[in-house]
Amino acid sequence: MTTVSELAARAKESSYILAALAPEIKDRALNAMACAMRVHADEILAANALDLQEAKHAVDAGKMKPALYERLKLTRDKLETVIKGVEELVALPDPVGRVMAATELDEGLALYKVSCPIGLIGVIFEARPDVVPQIAALAVKSGNAVVLKGGKEAAHTNEALTRTLKNALASVPGYPAESLQLIHTREESAQMLALDQYFDLIIPRGGNALIAYVKANTKIPVLGHADGVCHIYVAPSADLEVARRICVDAKTQYPSACNTVETLLLDERWPEKNKKALLAALVDSGVELFGGEDIAVLGPVAGPVADWHTEYSEKKLSVKQVKNVLEAVEHINRFGSHHTDCILTQEHDEAQIFMDLVDSAGVYHNASTRFADGYRYGFGAEVGISTGKTHARGPVGLEGLTIYKYKLYGNGQIVADYVGPNAKPFTHKKIGSKQ
């Protein structure tokens, strides 16, 4: 049986080939992946049905949350959306080899800052089998090798998808199919986290427990977000109909997503009739409200908020009244997860205050938090959303999967000529692109 170390070694070797692969070969690989998923759609969906059948027993036994079950579902429409996302990556510019800066150090000595792949990336995720083709496709376009570790609840689907994609990659001349690998168990996951000699980045996609475990058990750099406690602040000038549309969408369009609103902040000065109408619209949409006595007089509440850090991932919503935009900002920065937060207002200056002061990866004005998504941002897809402050923040697409290197082109120059009493001066002049 092949060990994780052996798989990682193969993938790492493949990453060196990928770094210099022509854009047309990568695009050919993407088209092959999309075609293969369409051809094998029935096989993939049948595998997902097996996972759903097993997951249903776990939900009924109280061993799995309904929200996790919902994330596990892969419908034909959802699969087709994923496939189209892969195809759209073909039309995007190649992120590798882009000259980010060019400087003449001296005549005949030119320095270029050029984008390049990160190398070998390990991705650990829970449920959501559509993560497999999304990440695999982004890895192809960005020239990275990837080892995937999915949750056991999606084992059949992950296996079917990975097998389909690897076969597609193997059909493309010049493309190293070993650059895509799948591992299955927690033991294998732990082994992967120890292989800092091979892996350049780990991306965990899941809850707090997973993120904490990964960060505590690896020396490899980690990129990701722990949870999605997103907020919407309704300012005094907010339009009721706009607020109703956005809040209902942000809470109910896909309740288990990490960019779903979890806390609604109502300005005390917003008309009481508007507050009642907004809360009524949420309740009519099946949302269960949690709040204090001041909220109970505005709409039916199921009880007080146990913890303002709560990510419900279902049709439940914390509600609070605040005095002004600054109190809203203070609450968000204290209790939020720095994911995505929104202000509803018709006052431009108030919106700017909110958007400048809220410390989140995404800050919105009069738009649903559900827009926080790599596909919707035009990235083709995403490997996840980063709430940290590393080289990538927010939805991490192609650009977030590249880093850069410095390329220096000379003609026999040595440092000794640039030091001492007769040192040659550097010109440090900005120049045009060489590539």
Image: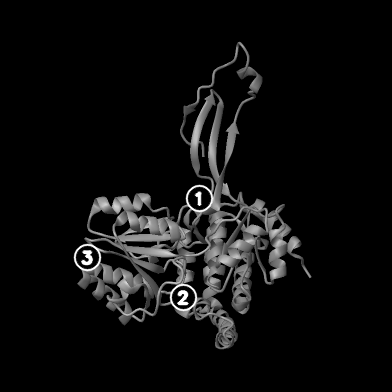
Q: Amino acid at mark 2?
A: Lys
| Residue wearing tag 2 | 78
Foreground label between 2 and 1 = 1
| Residue wearing tag 3 | 239
Q: Toward the viewer: 115 or 88?
A: 115
Marks 1/3 in contact by CB < 8 Å: the verdict is no
Q: Residue drawn at (24%, 75%), measured in percent from left and top?
A: 277
The percent coordinates of residue 334 (x first, y second) are 44, 57
Q: Toward the viewer: 207 or 390?
A: 207
The percent coordinates of residue 313 (x first, y second) are 46, 73
Whether residue 175 is visible to the viewer of this picture, yes or no, is no
**What is the quadrant of residue 144 in the picture?**
bottom right
Q: Is residue 46 found left or right of 354 in the rendered image?
A: right
| Residue wearing tag 1 | 389
Mark 2 or mark 1, earlier in chain: 2
Mark 2 or mark 3, earlier in chain: 2
Which type of secondary structure does the marked residue at label 3 adopt?
loop
Q: Residue drawn at (39%, 73%), measured in percent from left and top?
A: 317
Q: Which residue is most to the right?
A: 1
Q: Toward the viewer: 374 or 338?
A: 338
**What is the quadrant of residue 133 in the picture?**
bottom right
* Rendered image coloring scheme: one colour
